[in-house]
Image (spheres, rainbow, N blue to C red):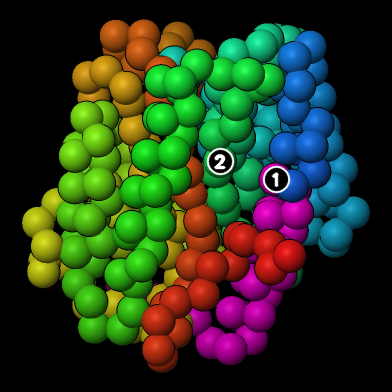
Amino acid sequence: MIICKSEQELAFMREAGRIVAESHRLISQAIEPGITSGELDRIADQYIRSQGAVPSFKGYNGFPASICASVNEQLVHGFPGKRKLIEGDIITLDIGAEYRGYHGDSAWTYGVGSISEEAQRLLDVTEGSLYAGLALVKPDVRLFTISHAIQKYIEEAGFSVVREYVGHGIGAELHEEPQIPNYGVADRGPRLKPGMVLAIEPMVNVGERYVKTLEDNWTVVTVDGSLCAHFEHTVAVTPDGMEIFTKLNA
């Protein structure tokens, strides 16, 4: 069942989204060669808690950290730790915050120092695919029309769409219905309604689409070792379109 949120619930989620967006801003300013992913985790954890929220991911199904930090060929669910970032790396930071019982969720892939042209193009295409999907979010649109637009944008650029991991509804639970694949046939799926809140999150590989999970049972990597990227916003369907909760206004 897809849950439509009340105005009060949307207000809580809007604040959760702001906290996530501000966490991304603070972390992005700290990313440089030599910093560890664990230090980035601490920045986000401290800020989230300072805002009267808690990290959504800490302890979620046993996850040990407040954010996911995935470097280069790591797609999602990487553990922050002692690894130092180096010039040319790309790092995906997935951040969630729970405020008054409601969640916000956003992922972004960042370059560390100067990155290759291929890596920059991967980041540009993945972010572009997210906004290609978001541009279609409004009442009465069928969900997989968004999925189709994301897939088309990515594949026309020559990259691969990961199929094992998808976007999701979000609210009082971090993961709610519906599941939102980044591929699909247009004009299929449930119709969007005002009050629905969605976490839309394209995941893109430079090489083949296949991924696998490492022995830690969390970190997902590309099978062929190619670079990958992940961009995500939490958005609400409004009567005349959509509102991005995890994007700062200024």
Q: Could you tell whether 89 is left or right of 38 in the image? A: left
Q: Are marks 2 and 1 in contact (CB under 8 Å)?
A: yes
Name the residue tied to disc 2: 108
The amino acid type found where label 2 is placed reads: Trp
Tell which of 243 and 194 is nearer to you.
243
Quadrant location of residue 190? bottom left
Q: Position of residue 170 (x, y in %)?
A: 48, 62
Tell which of 224 and 31 is nearer to you.
31
35 over 190 or under it: above or below: above
SS class of the residue under badge 2? strand
Q: Could you tell whether 214 is left or right of 66 in the image? A: left
- Assess whether residue 23 is covered by the magenta stretch: yes
Give the Cα distance between marks 2 and 1. 8 Å
At x 44%, y 39%, the residue is 124
Label 2: few (<14), some (14–19) or many (≥20) C-alpha neighbours in 10 Å? many
**Can see residue 211?**
no
Outermost residue, right direction?
50
- Where residue 24 is drawn, which disc sits there? 1
Tell which of 28 and 93 is nearer to you.
28
At x 39%, y 40%, the residue is 126
At x 36%, y 13%, the residue is 226
The amino acid type found where label 1 is placed reads: His
Disc 2 or 1, which lies upstream in sequence?
A: 1
Quadrant placement of the N terminus = bottom left
Tell which of 182 and 159 is nearer to you.
159
Q: Which residues are magenta?
A: 1-24
Quadrant location of residue 2? bottom left
